Every structure is written in structure tokens, then in C-alpha cells.
Image: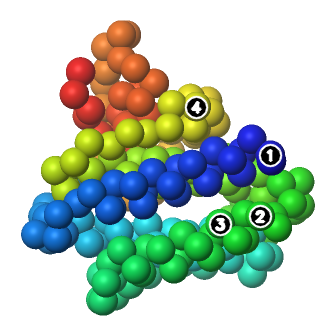
Amino acid sequence: MNPTIARYRRALDGVGDVLRRIPADRLRSPSPCPGWTTLHVLGHVIDGQRQIAALLTGDGPRAPRPDPLELVTGDPEAEWHAVYTSMRELLEVTDPNGLVPSHHGEVSAQWVLATAVIEPLVHTWDLARAGGVEACLDDEAVDACLADVTPMAGRFAATGMYAPAVPLPGHASPRQRLLGLSGRRDDL
């Protein structure tokens, strides 16, 4: 299997792992994303996977849903599982070298997955924090993501979707650096 696709799959696995361990009474807890609860973050992750699927299937970019809570109105774990299963099936047939339309023009599916993996990685951490459980982020996916997104990290806050990067000491781990790029501070 292509390493980028394998990393993306493991990042999706991390979301499900954390979600299964969040107590039901923590689903409406505040998350590290200002103004969002655990369910908001999960709805955003579900929507994000639908956006990635649209890119990978050649349907092109689509705007995020304005209200991520609309995507988690029933059983949040079942709603995640449906999107997760659909994405796993899509990843099985995705040609990593195939070109797809994106906001950046035509790019390879591999490029889409390499840069988009930041979403399930970072939001796994957000879900875990909100849910009061530990997040085990895939180290190899974190390392690869850090290498792929660091050159564009300066533009993250400008999108309005990320807080400004958090300054970190030189001894920060790759996980802490990745989270720091997206405006989050992991315990140092």
C-alpha cells in the first residue's frame, strides 16, 4: 500500500479510537476549538472527510458546512463509522498518482492526502482533550505531516481556520510542533 494512503488510514483510525473512549456525558464538553464542543469537532471531521472524498473522486473542492453539528444529530459513533467506512473503501481504490481538481489546481491524490492528514491528526487531539481521554497520534504520520505542512504553516492562521502558531522550545516533540503549528499547546 502507498505510504501516504497508509498514514491517512491510520490517522482516521485514531479518530475512531478516541471517539470510542469518550464518555457520552463528555460529547458536549468544550473543545480546544473556541466555541466548539466535542460534537462540533466530530461534525467538522466528518465534513472534512466528505470534502476529501469529493476531491479524490474528481468532484472538486466543496465548501465546508457552516454548522458541523448538523452532521452529528443521531448516534455520533455510528455517524463517524459510516464516514470512516466510506473513506476506507475510497482509499482502497484511490490512485495516489491520479490528478484531481483542488483549490490549488490539479494535484495528485497523494498530495491531497499528505496535506489533509493534518485534520484527522489535530482533531483527534482536540476530541481527546474535550473528551478527557488520551490521544495516541501515529508518530510516523505526525512526522510526515510535519514535513509536508511546515512550509505552508505560515498561511494556516490567515485562513481563519487555525489559531496563530504557538511558539515552542527547541526540545518540543514532533507531535508538539505539529499541534503548535495549528495553534495548540500540548503539555511540554
SS type, badge 3 = helix
Disc number placed over residue 92 in the picture, else none: 2
Position of residue 15 relative to residue 53, above or below, is above
Asked if the residue at tag 3 contacts the one at tag 2, i.e. Cβ–Cβ closer than 8 Å, the answer is yes
Q: Which sits in the foreground, 137 or 170?
A: 137
Q: Which badge, 2 or 1, comes first in the chain's sequence? A: 1
Position of residue 38 relative to residue 146, above or below, is below
The picture quadrant where one finds residue 71 is: bottom left
How many residues crowd mark 2 within 10 Å: few (<14), some (14–19), many (20+)? few
For disc 1, the marked residue is 2
Q: Which badge, 4 or 1, comes first in the chain's sequence? A: 1
The picture quadrant where one finds residue 170 is: top left
* Any part of residue 91 in sight: yes
* Image quarter in which the C terminus is found: top left
Amino acid carrying label 4: it is Glu
SS type, badge 1 = loop
Q: Residue at coordinates 26% horizontally, 34% vertically from top-left?
A: 185
For disc 4, the marked residue is 140
Q: CA distance from mark 2 to mark 4?
A: 20 Å
Amino acid carrying label 3: it is Arg
Q: CA distance from mark 2 to mark 1?
A: 10 Å
Residue 117, horizontal then vertical, whole percent? 57, 50
- How many numbered discs sit on the rendered protein? 4
Asked if the residue at tag 1 contacts the one at tag 3, i.e. Cβ–Cβ closer than 8 Å, the answer is no
Q: CA distance from mark 3 to mark 1?
A: 14 Å
Asked if the residue at tag 4 contacts the one at tag 3, i.e. Cβ–Cβ closer than 8 Å, the answer is no
Q: Residue at coordinates 52% horizontally, 57% vertically from top-left?
A: 12
Amino acid carrying label 2: it is Glu
The picture quadrant where one finds residue 96 is: bottom right
Position of residue 4 relative to residue 80, above or below, is above
